[in-house]
């Protein structure tokens, strides 16, 4: 497979290779792809856990709407992003 990187990404990867962090550009890209895969898998696990929690709450007679739950989660994300 041939992949073209934008100039900024390629330059950063080249610096990592030149610094000895990776033996080649391909190794660095493979490492990055592995990290991306892990992050997406973790996101999927968290979403599944959230869905299960919401389903259990609804089954127990939870009184918050989906919109209220989403607004709460958005607030939590925003709070985590603040320094």
Image (cartoon, rainbow, N blue to C red):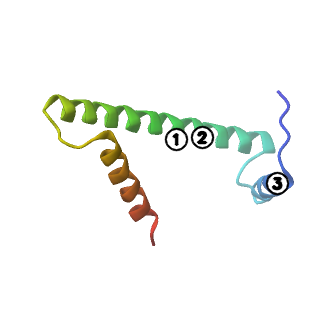
- Residue picked out by circle 3: 14
- Residue picked out by circle 2: 36
Q: Quadrant of residue 80?
A: bottom left
Please give the name of the residue rendered at 39% of the width and 38% of the height, measured from the top-left corner. 46
Please give the name of the residue rendered at 18% of the width and 41% of the height, measured from the top-left corner. 63
Label 3 or label 2, whichever comes before in sequence order: 3
Q: Residue 74 shows which numbered tag?
A: none
- SS at mark 3 in the image: helix
Label 1 or label 3, whichever comes before in sequence order: 3
Where is the N terminus found, in terms of image quarters?
A: top right
Q: In this image, 61 relative to 5: left or right?
A: left
- Asked if the residue at tag 1 contacts the one at tag 2, i.e. Cβ–Cβ closer than 8 Å, the answer is yes
- When the figure is inspected, residue 76 is found, relative to residue 23, above or below; the finding is below
Please give the name of the residue rendered at 70% of the width and 37% of the height, measured from the top-left corner. 30
Please rate how many residues cluster around mark 2, counting C-alpha atoms within 10 Å: few if below 14, some from 14 to 19, many from 20.
few
Where is the C terminus found, in terms of image quarters?
A: bottom left
Q: Residue 39 shows which numbered tag?
A: 1
Q: In this image, 5 relative to 57: left or right?
A: right
- SS at mark 1 in the image: helix
């Amino acid at each position: 497979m041939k992949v073209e990187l934008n100039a900024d990404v390629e330059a950063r990867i080249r610096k990592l290779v030149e610094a000895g962090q990776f033996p080649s550009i391909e190794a660095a890209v493979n490492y990055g792809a592995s990290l991306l895969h892990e992050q997406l898998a973790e996101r999927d696990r968290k979403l599944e856990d959230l869905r299960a929690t919401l389903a259990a709450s609804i089954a127990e007679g939870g009184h918050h709407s989906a919109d209220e739950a989403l607004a709460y989660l958005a607030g939590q994300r925003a709070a985590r992003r603040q320094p």
